[in-house]
Amino acid sequence: MKYGFVRVAAAIPMVKVADCKYNAHQIENLIAIADGKGVEITVFPELCITSYTCADLFQQTLLLEEAEIALMKILNDTRQLNIISIIGMPLSYAGVLLNCAVVIQKGKVLGIIPKTYLPNYKEFYEQRWFASADSVPKGETRLCGQIVPIGSHLLFDSPETTFGIEICEDLWAPIPPSSVLTLKGAEIIFNLSASNECIGKHEYLSSLLAQQSARCLSGYVYCSCGYGESTTDMVFAGNGLIYECGNEIATAKRFQYKEQLIISEIDVERIRNERRANTSFTKSIGAYQNTDMLHVNTEFLSRPDLILTRTYKPHPFVPEDQDRLDERCEEIFAIQVAGLIKRMDHIRAEKLVLGISGGLDSTLALLVCIRAFDQLKMGHEGIIAVTMPGFGTTDRTYYNAMKLMKSLGVTIREISIKNAVIQHFNDIGHDINIHDITYENSQARERTQILMDIANQMGALVIGTGDLSELALGWATYNGDHMSMYGVNASIPKTLVQYLVKWIANNEVDEETKNTLLDIVDTPISPELIPADENGNIKQKTEDLVGPYELHDFFLYYFFRFGYRPNKIFLLAKNAFKNQYTDEVIKKWLYTFFRRFFQQQFKRSCLPDGPKVGSVTLSPRGDWRMPSDANAGLWLKECQEL
């Protein structure tokens, strides 16, 4: 099973200028190696059979004939291989010389794509030797004894994907051919290039590839020539880059004095899902509906089941680079604060009320309130922070809550819920010694009632503290902590909450508050609704009950963001957590995730307002519209069969 992945490669051979026989041998070797590694489509650099830097030698008949002989040898020597190869060479057609990409498979030439945009500035003089694809008719030509289609209008269909090709400078054009190719159905673009190295050029190239693959919602495989091409005034570094919808997934090491083969898998299923969801992409297709394309069928690629070579990080919501993580935290915090300020301004609220438990979520919500008041130049006493100890409150969380509120200078109210809940148990006839869902939810609803009534009393706004992960799992008491007047954390996954609090601790507060915040980050996650153990420690740990939040956040990201089915999420989770969780553990919590996600939709259907922060959010007004009674059978069945 391939799960929608296509294995591709950028192959950078060692070449000699104008030595077609030598170059063909190097190309053959890399094709054989790539095929042995399960690569389905591989691309080589521009004009790699002759080398790019032949200059006026391109006008020599001998070189052109030797290039075709070299291609014939490659075809003959690789005819037993399934792999599709895209090779660069010069080709005489319609009375002119073209810079072409030749697509081959199993001894056949499938099609020829000429370069459209020919650079003729600074160190480049391509118009001296070549004509543009736009200057010749689309049609057929004879190459290596075969009649094959030629033109920039070709798309290639394999059982797994449709791909298109552009050549080097084509990418730099204001409207690259790849833009049209993708709108006409290409899911992966291959670029044969020969771009010399200059200061800052690699950074610009990476940005260009990221933008084009993101804008086209496509995979993009870029292959530029290396060391062997360097001659006279130009140095080539060997750029092999693979992108997927704006994300770099593999890259070559530049300035190597040897051949390179950069391999990865492009997730075509993701590309298709992204395109279906993006109405702007769909709308753009209409602009090119009269542009004719010729689809060329490739042969079936017989491959074993996929073994991923690319890796997936376990925390997709959290950037791995520390500088990027800091930037992300600062931006998220600013979005939360801006949303809250707008709501306060709209209803002319000068006071906020929120419950403080000593846990991560309420801590982050309080810090958002503090920053909002600072921005508005309002005193912190307008923030009414209420700690409401109950049957499961531990000393650690209680004292952390008190220390945090004192150091931030907010108005503190301590209201024990024990007597009120006991009275409630008596009213409804519930045995206090039965620690069931009634026992737990009565406490959560009592706390919410207190907050709502204080808000009425003080003319204030109740700030919700629940996060995205809890909403996904339905880990909230309906009309209890589920409800507020504005939920500032509703788009923040649990795995990111702790990084946000840690970032604020290190960048935004004094030393005393920092120490409290860091201890809160290290405290086990718990609703504290069940009494502590005999040593006063937290007995009810959320992750023991519903599973590790890092797993659930991973499941949520790939289910929501890309629409993946359980067996693919399972594959990716095994890849990301291979040294941390067994397959059985991942399977267990994946089943739990889907069961709870479908079962608890009714809670998400009536969420309070809250700021959208990232691409994954469950607001019923914007990003997630799901029937509350949808059947989970298909997803749970696949989980059971993993």
Image (cartoon, rainbow, N blue to C red):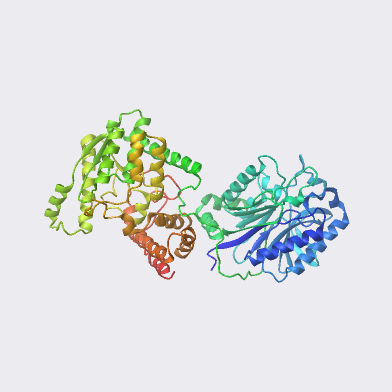
Does the image show residue 487? Answer: no
Q: Residue 434 in the image: x percent, y percent? A: 18, 59
| Residue that protrudes farthest toward the front in the picture | 535
Question: Viewer-proximal residue, 309 or 190?
Answer: 309
Up/down of 506 relative to 271, above or below: above
Given residues 540 and 246, the one toward you in this image is: 540
The quadrant in which the C terminus is found is bottom left
For the residue pair 160 and 205, the one nearer the viewer reads as: 205
Q: Above or below — where is 614 with respect to 87?
A: above
The reply, left or right, for residue 175 in relation to residue 384 is right
Please tell me which residue is depicted at 76% across the width and 50% down the height of the picture.
Answer: 229
Instruction: Count the labels in the image.
Output: 0
User: Could you say where residue 531 lies in the image, as x and y percent from the top left?
Assistant: 21, 53
- Position of 261 with respect to 610 (left or right) is right
306 to 552, vertically: above or below:
below
Residue furthest out toward the right: 61
Q: Position of residue 21 (x, y in %)?
A: 81, 61
Write down the quadrant of residue 189 in the picture. Answer: bottom right
Residue 64 horizontal/vertical position (percent): 84, 57
Instruction: Locate residue 151 relative to residue 592 in the image: left or right.
Output: right
283 relative to 17 in the view: left or right: left
Q: Is residue 210 visible?
A: yes
Q: Quadrant of residue 557?
A: bottom left
